[in-house]
Amino acid sequence: MLLIRTIGRFMHLDRHLPYFLRGRVVTGFGRGGKQLGCPTANIEEPVVEALPTDFPCGVFYGLARVDGEQVDNMVMSIGWNPQYQNVKKTLEVHLLRKFDKDFYGSMMDVLILGFIRPMAAFNSLDELRAAIASDIAIAGKELEQCDRQALLQRFFQ
């Protein structure tokens, strides 16, 4: 049995987790790395549209891998990003390992394990950067407590 912790109880999220998805990495808005110092991999739109209709928007943590390689810790957002008033729902993954190059066009496997917080608009980019830093710290702590080997065997074989 896998034990999954969810930071914030939100709607009926527990029945969705863990949630596994696979999609191609596409070009995003170009804000994550440039404006926020947090590069993200945007997942193609059909994958976002295929999420369960009651899957909430917000910031999540979990595991991901690019092109079947190493499995990395990640933090991600799902939603319309109120900070930038997006009109299109996106799924943006930030891997907690530095990559030397972009991987647009690559396939990414994503395992969502827990919810951190709902999406929010902030008063400044500095506040948003601070929230992202907090999200990354929370994700790291939560992922230290999960049964990584069981998750790898179940979802990444």
Image (spheres, rainbow, N blue to C red):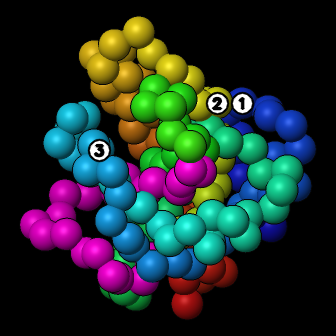
Residue 129 is a magenta residue: no
Q: Cα distance, mark 3 to mark 1? A: 24 Å
Q: Is residue 156 visible?
A: yes
Q: Where residue 42 sits in the image (x, y, percent)?
A: 42, 61
In the rendered structure, which amino acid carries the disc numbered 3?
Gly
Q: Cα distance, mark 3 to mark 2? A: 18 Å
Q: Cα distance, mark 1 to mark 2? A: 9 Å
Mark 1 neighbour density, 10 Å: few (under 14) some (14–19) many (20 or more)? few
Mark 3 neighbour density, 10 Å: few (under 14) some (14–19) many (20 or more)? some
Residues rendered magenta in the picture: 88-109
- Disc 3 or 1, which lies upstream in sequence? 1
Q: Is residue 142 visible?
A: no
Quadrant into which the N terminus falls: bottom right
> Which residue does the numbered mark 1 point to in the structure image?
8
Give the SS element for disc 2.
loop
Q: Where residue 9 sits in the image (x, y, percent)?
A: 79, 33
Mark 2 neighbour density, 10 Å: few (under 14) some (14–19) many (20 or more)? some
Decide if residue 135 is on the left or right side of residue 153. Answer: left
Q: Quadrant of residue 21?
A: bottom right
Seen at 29% across and 75% down, the residue is 104
Residue 94 is a magenta residue: yes
Seen at 21% across and 46% down, the residue is 33
> Which residue does the numbered mark 2 point to in the structure image?
118
> Which residue does the numbered mark 3 point to in the structure image?
32
125 w.r.t. 135: above or below: above
Seen at 66% across and 80% down, the residue is 154
- Disc 1 or 2, which lies upstream in sequence? 1
In the rendered structure, which amino acid carries the disc numbered 1?
Gly
